[in-house]
Image (cartoon, rainbow, N blue to C red):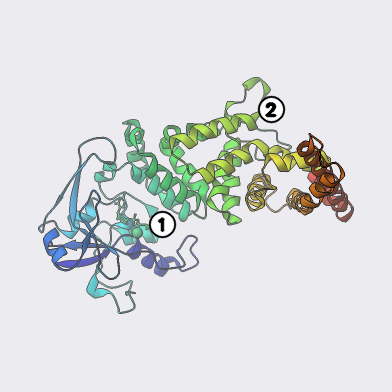
Amino acid sequence: MQFFLVGGAVRDALMRHLHGAATPGSPAAESDRDWVVVGATPQAMAAQGFVPVGRDFPVFLHPQTHEEYALARTERKVAHGYHGFVFHTAPDVTLEQDLARRDLTINAMALPAAALRPDGRFDPDDPRLVDPYGGRRDLAAKVLRHVTPAFAEDPVRILRLARFAARWPDFTVAPETMALMRAMVERGEVDHLVPERVWQEIARGLMEPRPSRMLQVLRDCGALRVLLPEVDRLWGVPQRADHHPEVDTGVHLEMVLDMAARLQAPLAVRYACLGHDLGKGTTPPEILPRHHGHEARSARLLRQVGARWRVPRECQELADVVAREHGHIHRCGQLGPEATLRLLQRCDALRRPQRFEQVLLACECDARGRLHREDQPYPQAARLRAALQAALAVDTAAIAAAIQAQKPDAPDLGPRIGAAIERARVQAVAQALAAQDGAAPAEAEAANGGTT
Ligand SMILES: Nc1ccn([C@@H]2O[C@H](COP(=O)(O)OP(=O)(O)OP(=O)(O)O)[C@@H](O)[C@H]2O)c(=O)n1
Ligand SMILES: [Mg+2]
């Protein structure tokens, strides 16, 4: 049996060679290594100590390295969805046949194990590189191209391709690949994807350096309309040019997501960015370009999206708060101490200050994800942070003890303590806001400039 390194590890090493380590999205660490085995049977693999992993395909884990070793196989689609495969694996399946059923030419290159140096690296010009479908050429030309029509057998590949586009923003999609993806979408291939795989790819795409590219590719081929119609609807929807010089809501969304990547926001923040303006897609046409009430509509649509793709709770909860409160947070410079405290409470900021930092980051991405505003400060964050610190610093135990000492038998002791704590917090927030206004009047003024 023969072992070949295949897929991402070969691609990423060649990528570094051709385009340098500075290529956006080139992994800092080594990519995980996938292997393909030719001329083997499951029995022979087991005899060598490889451990079968209970999945749909004949895949094994190396007993020491735990890297994935898949028997060379051919695949044929028999039904919709991920489980509609039959695969054929046998010692006579060739490497070329195995590479032919892979998604992209840049992922369909293989290198014999013997070509690897002891440190795991290899000579990018090694003539033993097996590249029957022009992967190296496409990598050099920065083209995402499918290998054969077998691409269509796994519709998740549309999402994978969109994710690779987000990883390497200057790669283009080959026209014939875009045409194939459009045909797949028209045939209804994207209608039957399982939530787990869709969410996994969307989440990964959001975490790439240019998430907007993922949305562009999915929109181009029509998959976005099927998977996330609430998002797809945003292009062509106008916003007020004074708040949004880019005007188009879809363009704004792209800029917000790319800002989230620029600010290295975690996944929950990026998901919250994705969802914050969904309600603008269902604004009654007669009130455009205003979007009165879009926050509540966003929250409602987000519940729909979250249930459809089984979005993790942490992401859904953050997105919900950001959808409902981003307008109030942008305009917090206009809020007095009571309203500021209520805003913090609606965000559950007193109990979850770390989570509130994520809320603020998503709002900053929203504010700076606008044409010509990319480098503007976001003083609202400092203002609310100061208000929160002040509210948290109130000694609630001391207040409770003092009231209890005054009237230990009062029947309404609980509510009285609650009201006293509230008053003390409002006072503390008032002082903090006054200090903010005194320290940076210009910035406080900027925080008044309402952004919707
Ligand atoms: N739907 C899929 C998934 C995987 N592959 C093939 O299996 C390889 C390994 O898959 P995976 O590890 O998921 O992706 P990588 O390409 O290695 O990329 P990443 O850097 O995200 O790991 C891919 O390169 C590709 O050849 C495929 O053809 N179709
Ligand atoms: Mg991999």
Question: Who's the residue at 52% across and 55% down the image?
Answer: 209
* Quadrant of the rendering where the N terminus is positioned: bottom left
Local packing at callout 1 (Cα closer than 10 Å; few below 14, some 14-19, many 20+) is: many
Q: Residue furthest front?
A: 409
Q: CA distance from mark 1 to mark 2?
A: 43 Å
Image disc number at residue 142: 1
Q: Is residue 383 visible?
A: no
In the displayed structure, would residue 242 be above or below residue 122? above
Residue carrying label 2: 292
Dot 2 amino acid type: His
Q: Does the beta carbon of the residue at mark 2 sit less than 8 Å from ligand 1?
A: no
Image disc number at residue 326: none
In front: label 1 or label 2:
2
Dot 1 amino acid type: Lys
Q: Quadrant of ligand 2?
A: bottom left
- Could you say whether the residue bearing mark 1 is in a helix, strand or loop? loop
Instruction: Name which quarter of the figure residue 310 lies in.
Output: top left
